Image (cartoon, rainbow, N blue to C red):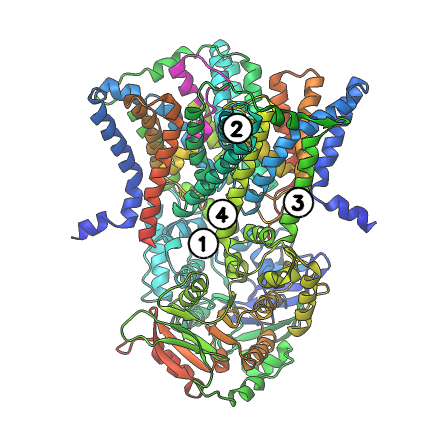
Amino acid sequence: MTPSTRKIVTFEKVAKHFGAVKALNGVDLHVDRGECLGLVGHNGAGKSTLMHVLAGTLSPSFGTIAVYGEDITSSYDVGVANANGIRCVFQELSLCPNLTVAENTRIFHPSLKGWGWKRRASALIRTKLDEIFPDHGILPDDIVGDLSIGKRQMIEIARAFTVTEAPLNLVILDEPTSSLDAVTSAQLLDYVRRVGGEDQSCILISHMLGEVLEYTDRIAVMKDGAVVANRSTKDFDRDSLVKAMGNVVEMAEIQKHEACERVRGETPLVLEAATDGADSVAFRAHKGEIIGLAGLAGHGQTALLLKIYDAATKRRPDLRIDGPLALVAGDRQTDGIFHLWSIAQNIGVRSLPRMVKRGLIDPLAETALGEEWKDRIKIKAPDMNDNILSLSGGNQQKALFARALASDASITLMDDPMRGVDVGTKLEVYDLIRAEAEKGRTFLWYTTETDELKNCDHTYVFREGVIVADIARVDLSEEIILQSSFKEHA
Amino acid sequence: MTHVRQIVEKPWIWSFVGMFLVWLATVLYTGGTGATQVITAALSFATFTVIVGIGQMFVITTGPGNVDLSIPSTIALSGVLAMKIMGGSDAMLAVGLGASLASGFAVGVFNYMLIRLLRIPPIIATLSSSFLILSTAIAYGRGLKIKPPRMLADFTSAQVAGVPILAVVIILFAVGMSILLNRTLYGRSVLAIGQNMRAARLAGIRVERIRFATYTLSAVLAAITGFLLAGFSGGASLNMGQEYLLASIAVVVIGGTSVAGGKSNVPGIWGAAMFMFLLVTMLNTFGASAGIRLILTGIIIVTVITIAGGDKPAR
Amino acid sequence: MIMLAYLTSPKFLRSALPGASFAFLLLAIFYVQPNAMSYFGLNMMLQYSVPIALATIAQMFILTVNDLDLSIGAFVGLTASIGATLLADTPLLGVLALAGAVAGYALLGALIHWRNLPSIVVTLGMSFVWLGIAVLILPTPGGTAPGWVKSIMALQLPFVPFPIVAALVIGIVVHLFLMTSSFGVVLRGAGGNARAVGRAGWSLLRIKVLMYAAAGLFGVLSGLSLIGLTSAADAHIADRYTLYAIAGVILGGGEFVGGRVSPIGAVIGALTLTLTGSFLIFLKISPDWQIGAQGAVLIIVLALRALIKRREA
């Protein structure tokens, strides 16, 4: 079959309503053969919903979907999408942890069956992994559950690019670099650009505007369930892109605060942790400091935060903590929210002991706390008694911040909390964190985004579970962090 | 209008509706005779199911995989132990009750130790321990035929104007448990753990203490049931707890507690326990054979859970 | 050195644990009662392992898709009752009834998937239904097993006793289907991450129906093999099998959630469980402690597993 049109997929006035919520509100969009389309927008702008419609896991309420110019809206589902070579790598991983890498490949390809399916599946996935991520260190017989989250994401991405019977025309990558470190991210993006030349198309959804600007041919900007800008990437720069997304806060905010550097050691030490390794730098945090934890993903940052967190209830000889702790989770669904509870209850849960009167929790105090933080952290919700899931991802994250900041904790641990959060929310929360630090609270902030480290007074760089560098804000730069993140002799 | 809707949306309302319908069918069939006696009997027997049901509810609320399968053997052990120690003497009543409570506490601690130290699923832990507990009860109470002390027997069967005193006590107890669930740190922690154990730990909840308390509570309530049941039925027997395994789980589910954890309510347990008893009464009145009775009981449990539906998948 | 490192690695220990506990128990029995170390001794001790192994495999199918079956004991009781009455008297009707029972299980799977129901509660309710039907068919213990069923179970194989061979065959057949076939991968995948399997285009409804039907089939086989040994049936004949089957899967190294199961392990688990009973008889331990000892064996094996896991972490 020779395609009669260059347009692989065309969306016309596609809308998706969940009850009263209009997640998509008339989207017009198309993807050309061989192009890489960037899709950006704040959380809740409708990007993920759009991709679910495209992948066939959600059907649109209105509008038409055409593949190669042919209207197939009514029959469109996962099977049709697969048959037309449209694949999707979702934000939440879709691998089976109990199966091997090869077996996961088999799940994806109905044609891998009969004698020798295992050998064929192994060869298929190994070849693709080698092609995209050289030195990946993954074996086809590895059980997926035993691998790190970064490796799992690599497998997931590689699997989406494997081809058996069905053609491969379009791969949708939804925040593909969120769990990848700088090197593997670059490998992936280079590969995406390479296959673009070979007639395969790609949609890249990312909050990392730099990635989108550097690697895509065209950028579509979404806002409030519609595409508000759709131009060649050449016509965008960072500022115009941010403006198109509808940012209220200027990026200049961050720069302004960079000026006020704190002198280290003026305030008392509140946390000290010995880390393993002979030449490891000791981990120290003083009252009122914002401490960054950097380095490649999965090199011990989260592990240290959890170790510190556990030490609050179980004393350890290698850790000294002065003051109560709170933690802001990055993985909202598994570490953060209580999905059956209201927004107010989710905020109040960390502060319940304060609300007990004569042995019983005072419901008024809980409501009051919710209302207070609705204003302070600007949670966009009609009623704080609504279920937490009625909020967009960014606002759910705000509720988690409110939970920690409303508590009695003097030290707040943050486990890459801005993962997949839009720029507007980020800037608001940065301000809040700095204001709280001024008041004497201490923050330990693990982040995968180098830009965020600009908020930190000091940054510890991790490599293989060990702290290899301690960088003050004045010395901070992307190069220094990258340099420390890799072995000297490498 | 919103009030009506709020009530209809309460998950426990259906158990009371079912209870009423079954009662109505029975009374219509008999032409009105025994309408109140049936209620009295239902209150008497449901009491025991309610006590174990509440313990099971707290356990199930702590999340998927949490079920206490050791309830029947704990009932047996506690009953046998108390009867033997009291030897039918009123003077030993307090000692017997103390021994019964202690046995429940010990079982709870043992169950939790298995779960915690062996890191095994609670179903398996309580299943394994139930074997051991039952063996202990068998070995301890062989050939047992001891009457309960008079005072205990009188207390468990006393009625005022057709209302069993014990049922009133347990209704008050249920109110207390409802407050424990909804308004205390313990209850809130249970609800949080049931939704997401990891998130609960990271939100500052002492997860393991709460789970310990929950399994202990369940075992102690089972022990109390064994104590009272032995008094009510004129002595302890080794299989007196048998029916309470299925019954305790059934009343929790029919009462509107989510098996996925994190959502539960106490009133529904009373409704469901009454419903279960009245259902069997109704079938007996209709003259159904044992086989039919079993089949219908099963079908009703499956139907209730089908209508109540599973948990809506998270978005 | 590498060999030794491998032999003491948690991964190896974990996979070897089911076999090791079985071997340990067997050696203990031989030590206490050397007479047991014979063709007939093994045959006697292990004959009931066949129905238990089949029920364990049935439970394992359900556990693979993250459900739990609390009705398998009652179901085996029902199929045993059908086997000893209808199947013996009017074979055609008997076969139809058994096929209907398997279809009932498949429907149950469909219902559980369709309404996203907790399997524990549904199967709990169904255990009443199966028991009720069994009581209707066979109100008092009795009936006779069909002759062919009895003769299969009384089979005398050369050198190796029939129960051992039968258990091995059961384990290997299910292993080939579930663990190595390309379709078995999909079935286990549904236990690991159902949503992902659904997104890849597989019907989760079909998977669940298939797994429940398979469980029903093995339940039928378990019931038939049981009456082949006992000759007569009783509605309550297999009440304990629900617990045996769960314990068997767990002793065999299976996990409760996440589709991590092992058919061969499950069969070994069932054998271990059967041996426990014989061991106690040989030790002349009071029957009062029989069930207690089975619980103890379960706890000890789980404790060993916990130790290995701790080393893994």
Is A151 positioned to the left or the right of B241 in the image? left
Label 1 is found on which chain of the structure? A
Question: Marks 2 and 4, how far apart in space?
Answer: 23 Å
As for residue C244 lying within the magenta part, the answer is: yes
Nearest to the observer: residue B282 or residue C200: B282
Nearest to the observer: residue C44 or residue A434: A434
Question: Residue A234, how many percent across, how many down?
Answer: 54, 82
Q: Which mark is residue A95?
A: 1
As for residue C135 lying within the magenta part, the answer is: no
Q: Which residue is mark 4?
A: B212
**What amino acid is at disc 4?**
Phe
Classify mark 2: residues with Cα within 10 Å, few (<14), some (14-19) or many (20+).
many
Classify mark 3: residues with Cα within 10 Å, few (<14), some (14-19) or many (20+).
few
Farthest residue, direction right: B1
Q: Which residue is mark 2?
A: B79
Is A400 positioned to the left or the right of C270 in the image? right
Q: Is residue A68 in view?
A: no
**What amino acid is at disc 2?**
Gly
Same chain for the residues under marks 4 and 3 in the image: yes
